[in-house]
Image (spheres, rainbow, N blue to C red):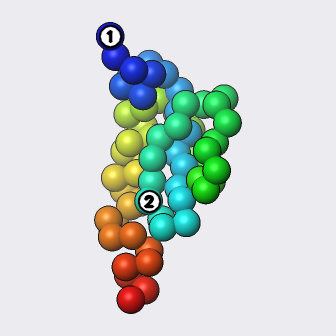
């Protein structure tokens, strides 16, 4: 049995935290504390493509400032 986060037909939104780390979150669920919506919603694959195109530096923001 797969989790909701692995379902390709589920709608997600892209979220980002203060460290500029991206993730997908099920559409309609409350976004966890410390995370913000970026305005991209869609199928899991669309959201993952958005993350791949926009998360170009995988290092946490605190590390890139150092």
Does the rendering let one see residue 38? no
Q: Residue at x 34, y 52 (%)?
A: 52
First of labels 1, 2 by sequence position: 1
Q: Are discs 1 and 2 less than 8 Å apart at CB?
A: no
Is residue 18 in sight in this rendering? yes
Instruction: State the image coordinates of residue 25 (x, y, percent, origin top left).
Output: 52, 37
Q: SS at mark 1?
A: loop
Quadrant in the picture for the N terminus = top left
Residue hosting label 1? 1
Q: Which mark is residue 21?
A: 2
Question: Residue 45: which quarter of the image?
Answer: top left
Q: Residues within 10 Å of mark 2 (few under 14, many from 20)?
A: some
Q: Quadrant of residue 8?
A: top left
* Residue shown at the point (42%, 28%) measured from the top left: 5
For label 2, the SS is: loop
Which residue is nearer to you in this view: 34 or 28?
A: 34
Across and down, in percent, residue 14 comes to: 52, 45
Residue at left 38%, top 81%? 64
Residue 22 pos. (x, y %): 45, 54
Which of 33 and 22 lies nearest the eye of the viewer? Answer: 33
Q: Is residue 49 above or below residue 17?
A: above
């Amino acid at each position: 049995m797969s989790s909701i986060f692995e379902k390709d037909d589920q709608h997600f939104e892209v979220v980002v935290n203060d460290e500029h780390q991206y993730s997908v979150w099920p559409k309609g669920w409350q976004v966890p504390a410390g995370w913000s919506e970026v305005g991209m919603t869609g199928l899991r694959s669309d959201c993952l493509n958005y993350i791949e195109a926009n998360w170009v530096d995988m290092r946490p923001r605190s590390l890139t400032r150092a």
